[in-house]
Image (spheres, rainbow, N blue to C red):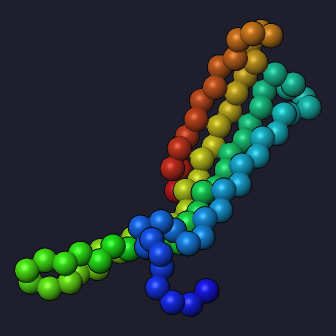
Amino acid sequence: MKGNAVNPNLPRTSVKLFTRYRLPAIPELTVGGGVNWQNRVYKDTTTPYGTFRAEQGSYALVDLFTRYQVTKNFSVQGNINNLF
């Protein structure tokens, strides 16, 4: 789509993909992770000195987790957010 963005503060495109996997050898252990990606956003700001554009480029965030099911009603989970 060409032309001016209706709201350039919001990404025009974003993708979120997450998954998890239960290890067959250790059924109490689940590992997983995901990726969040978005394209660039910007904001035009007018000051007495002129109009300036603040821009944030596109980026991806990667998250990982592991969970251990201790009992039927209790599990322990560790997360790593924004790994790279």
- Please state the horizontal and vertical placement of residue 63, each as a whole percent of the image: 60, 47
Outermost residue toward the front in this view: 6
Residue 64 appears in which quarter of the rendering? top right
- State the quadrant of the N terminus: bottom right
Residue at image point 85% right, 26% down: 26
Classify 72 as above or below 54. Answer: above
Rendering coords of residue 22 (x, y %): 84, 34
Residue 12 lies, in percent from the top left, at 56, 72
Is 54 above or below relative to 17?
Answer: below
The residue closer to the viewer here, 2 or 75, is 2
Q: Note whether 42 is above or below 70 in the view shown.
A: below
- Position of residue 55 in the picture relative to residue 46 (left or right): right
Residue 9 visible from this viewpoint:
yes
Q: Quadrant of residue 79?
A: top right
Q: Image check: 44 left or right of 33?
A: left
Q: Give the side of residue 69 with respect to residue 46, left or right.
A: right
Q: Is residue 41 visible?
A: no
Q: Residue at x 46, y 85 (%)?
A: 4
Would residue 77 be found to the left or right of residue 28 on screen? left
